[in-house]
Amino acid sequence: MRTHKAPRWLAALAVLALVVAACGDGDDDVAETTAAAPTTTAAPTTTAAPTTTAAMPDVALADVCPAMIVVQTDWFPEAEHSELYHLAGPGGDIDSTNGTYTNEIGDTGVMLQVRAGGPYIGFQNDISLLYQDSSIHLAYTNTDEQVRLSASQPTVGIVAPRDKNPQIVMWDPELYSLESFEDLGDQLRANDGTLLYFEGATYIDYLLGKGWVSEDQIDASYDGSPARFIAEGNLVQQGFASAEPYQYQNEFEDWGKPVDFMLIHDSGLEMYPQLIAGKPDIIEEYRGCWELFVPMVQQAQVDYAADPSATNAQIVEIVAALDSFWQYSPGVAQYSHDAQLELGLISNGPNDTIGDFDIARVNEVIALLADIYGPQGLETWDPDVTATDIVTNEFIDPSIGLPSMDTEAMAMATLAEVCPAMIVVQTDWFPEAEHSELYHLAGPGGDIDTTNGTYTNEIGDTGVMLQVRAGGPYIGFQNDISLLYQDSSIHLAYTNTDEQVRLSASQPTVGIVAPRDKNPQIVMWDPELYSLESFEDLGDQLRANDGTLLYFEGATYIDYLLGKGWVSEDQIDASYDGSPARFIAEGNLVQQGFASAEPYQYQNEFEDWGKPVDFMLIHDSGLEMYPQLIAGKPDIIEEYRGCWELFVPMVQQAQVDYAADPSATNAQIVEIVAALDSFWQYSPGVAQYSHDAQLELGLISNGPNDTIGDFDIARVNEVIALLADIYGPQGLETWDPDVTATDIVTNEFIDPSIGLP
């Protein structure tokens, strides 16, 4: 008998909830489980994905959708319809006569009506109903039904909330020991058994065609009742992995023991189940609507997977209100959620996206079905149908998915098992919003050491401490990489691509996450004097205004600008010390700064200036270095590889969470700076401005993809080539002329599913 292990996906959610979001524990009550049935785990709250409402787009749904979107389901409300009931939300109207549940989608002004199937539609096929009732926009269906009716009643599937078919064949494990469908016929014969199923099930024709069962071993009289299975004992029976295994053990007292099963999906007939489809003309007519609605369905499924409690309670309540022969308990609802995740029924499939269709897989299923429908001479079937006739990924948002398998694997170990007792990260300056991800991950209530400029706190309840060390005067204004090589207690440090390349021979480092995609460094000026549009204009306008470019000594971008001929040696001054005094007094300076601080400070905090400045990002000069990336010595990265596999996604998620709500972290940073009581001052106003500017300017962003924190290897190599033109002529012995991007950065520990919405 096969056993079903606890889902790694649920473990991933638990770790993210505990470690990243620092949320409270979920409900401790779990459904009774067995070795043969999936373990029921109370799902925790998590911030790994935004809520459905938060994911809604700026375009108004009401502008492009019908006033009420009507979706026809295939049965009574159940957890296999989770995405629709989650999206509809609680507090809707239940029509017990017609079996409908209606509610507004958030505050969009658009209603969603979910219609029950089964007896409420005379047990009809949903596709047939689409063609009878023009009030229905979308309906659940399966790939086989789409193909079977592809000539007479064509449909287009626009989202597949489930990746695998929950249908099973199940048996008494005390009698059968099935390992594959190929064994089914032989074991039925050995046990004088019969395969009991609902009439019309396509998979039966498939099994017959494969020779795995024979006509005399099948019985199409199954009516959904457990009576025969319990009474006869030797049946193999159709069911759903997300319901019957729980019900037979926990709700059917005359059985009261485990069953075992195989998914129909694992027979090789990999149909998409309960995909949401519409008639081609409806898909075309409301194209703008589905562009908004489909990502909401995707996100609703992700949110349900993370926390099913409210939606399951809502489904149970609706079923009770319908007051029919169909009963649905909280236990089976929770079991269904857990089983759907463990068995991959709800999953991303082969990529990081939930709800999309694998076109090659659909074509393979079509080919298998042709061997069934062809000999039957079905006139409803189009023998020339292809996957792109019946499904589309046009409306899918590829950035929406369950936490990736990498994150799941990470969750299998605890942080304390693979990390040092305290992870120490050296920053490059005083605490500021440009260090948001670390202070957000450390969380509030930590210890502030005002002498050494450190902030230390436990990461959630992991048993691992995170110490964030301030830079600047606390490290004698040293370079962070040099400090990594002096102080063995430091595991990671902030650095920039140029520093990594400059020290690539003498003090090599490996960057493991880039919380910011663009360098916040700027050159800024008085817009009443300068009207710069690009760096190419800089030298000419400095000359016209008798100005000087004031910067911190050692800034690599100055060598880059000199090399490009955009400024000359007589136009630059390396004596900048961070004070605003000269910029204010002289008025005609162009000065180094940070887009996330100085524009606010000069207008709002430096009273002697008190007006706007304008600026250009150094990034926009063409020198696209990664700033404040988190790196370590190669031996430390190797020694704690298991730790970084867990820690890096936490840093990514911390940055996503900070972007969504900076208030607590900004307050914490301001509090730490105040406690340090140094010359450095940091106000709530500049902290909020920094957050907003970092997002608006793309400093914190996903870069060219949907992932936050990863490195664009081609971009790093381009920067290395630019820096070679600087460091080469200087004859730097600290620089390795053969260095490449993969020597100094890695995406090995990045979770590609984590990104900004």
Image (tube, rainbow, N blue to C red):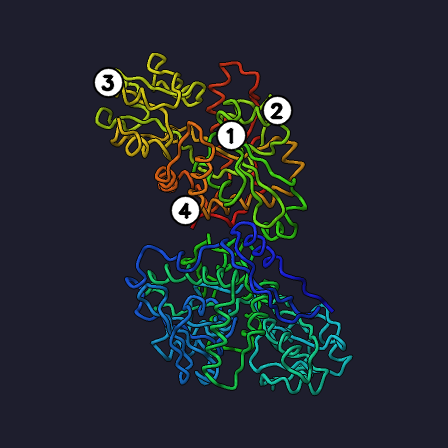
Instruction: Give the number of the mark in front: 4 or 1.
Output: 4
For marks 1 and 2 on the same chain, the one whose residue lies earlier in the sequence: 2
For marks 2 and 3 on the same chain, the one whose residue lies earlier in the sequence: 2
Are discs 2 and 3 less than 8 Å apart at CB?
no
Q: Secondary structure at mark 1?
A: strand
Q: Identify the disc placed on residue 486.
A: 2
Quarter of the rendering containing residue 687: top left
Are discs 4 and 3 less than 8 Å apart at CB?
no
The picture places residue 543, in percent across and down from the top left corner, at 26, 16
Separation of marks 1 and 2 at Cα, in angstroms: 15 Å
The kind of residue tagged 4 is Ser
The kind of residue tagged 3 is Asn
Q: Identify the disc placed on residue 545.
A: 3
> Which residue in the protein does label 1 denote?
495
Left or right relative to 693: residue 142: right
| Residue 697 in view (yes/no) | no
For marks 2 and 4 on the same chain, the one whose residue lies earlier in the sequence: 2
When the figure is inspected, residue 516 is found, relative to residue 130, above or below; the finding is above
